[in-house]
Amino acid sequence: MKFPTSISTLILGAAAASSSSNAIALAAESSGYCPTIYADFVRRQLANFSPDGIFVAQEGESQKHTPFLTLSDDGKSATVIVGNGEEEGGVYHPMSASTDPLEVHFVTHILVKDQDGNFIVNEALDPTVAAPATITFAVPDGVTEMVAYEWCNKHGLWAGPAVQVSTSETETVPVQEKSLEVSAECSVSDFPEAAWPSVHADFLRLQAQVFESEMPYTEADGEKHVPYITVNEDGTSSILVGKVGGPIHPMNGSDGETPPHWITEIYVVDQDGKIVAMKSLDPTGVTEATMTFDTPEGATTMQAYSWCNIHGLYEGPVTEVEAPAEVEITEEATDADAVTVKEAPSSGTAAVVSLSVIASALTLTALEM
């Protein structure tokens, strides 16, 4: 399998579709997220890993990064496993969760495309789940060939071998009826909660290696990328990346010709440095990077972080969370005057979240494939 070196050629390959799978194309790419994240992986691959494009392990080379796709006996589902640890002398790709930017190493995403470049599935993975990195998905009607891709946080984008699909095994449901299932599969995929500390550690690693900054950027570096928290009265909190009335960060997905530019993730830490919420964002049809989440009980302060695929990690200002008023009920009181409201004491000072940044120790060493 040969891959072109041009980013526009690589991205456009995802947009071509024959009439036999137009319904799959419309369904799978209705959100625009899968072509966008793939385009960003291609951009990063060409910039940071290989000017020749996507890696494909050749015969005799280590298959640790190769995503192998296998069909179920009835051909209605497929499984992707990264590595060949089941073979003698083979190895699975590690899934090493860590809060240490030097140690975190895992397959962050697996994607699958069909014979026409339509995306079938995308899934963000949890490094706390033991290797091998694995996903299973339904095979849509009309698919005759599939290729799996995986993104390793340290070693880039890899493609597996093409797998042929027998049409007699998949043509049990009309394409038009199956399209909703495809659309539900290939869309934005949030990282599982257990993965959040590792995702943060990887952002710190990238911040140091790619952007040469030991710490996240702040308001002093520009408000457009800064995530601002608003604590709402209904028990929720909202985040906007950028300022109302000021610069707002764009949410530009890939149009098939130019690389995307968007906020890929927003997340929040409390006064103890615990990540209490994280969201992966889909730039399709939106103009702002936003997030709404339940304000965690016991939180006295919160601080938000945003990752821009082009410009790196930014942290917002520390936001104080007012404690709810205490309610005291006296035995002597009647129903009309039984409730006494006492204002809870203020926390006084804003907590400073410890990032446990080890980024200063990071060096740009050669990658070990």
Image (tube, rainbow, N blue to C red):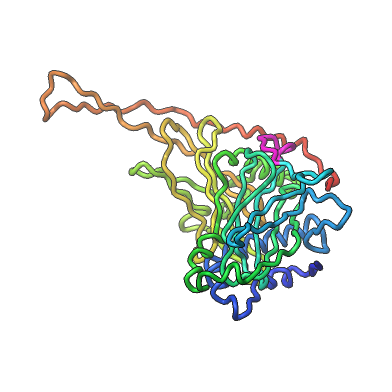
Q: Where the N terminus falls, by quadrant?
A: bottom right
- Can I make out residue 250 in this image? no
Q: Nearer the viewer, residue 283 or 73?
A: 73
Q: Quadrant of residue 149?
A: bottom right
The answer to whether residue 94 is left or right of residue 17 is right
Point 79% across, 63% down: residue? 53
Against 359, residue 56 (above or below) is below
Point 37% across, 31% down: residue? 323
Pinpoint residue 328: horizontal percent, then vertical percent.
24, 24
Point 80% across, 51% down: residue? 63
Point 84% across, 49% down: residue? 62
Q: Nearer the viewer, residue 136 or 86?
A: 86
Q: Quadrant of residue 254?
A: bottom right
Q: Nearer the viewer, residue 12 or 229?
A: 12
The answer to whether residue 247 is left or right of residue 361 is left
The answer to whether residue 279 is left or right of residue 87 is left
Outermost residue, top side: 332
Against 247, residue 85 (above or below) is above
Magenta-highlighted residues:
95-104
Outermost residue, bottom side: 19
Residue 98 is one of the magenta-drawn residues: yes
Pinpoint residue 46: horizontal percent, then vertical percent.
78, 61
Pinpoint residue 243: horizontal percent, then vertical percent.
49, 54
Residue 342 is one of the magenta-drawn residues: no
- Can I make out residue 256 in this image? yes
Outermost residue, right side: 60
Report the predominant secondary structure element of the magenta stretch. loop
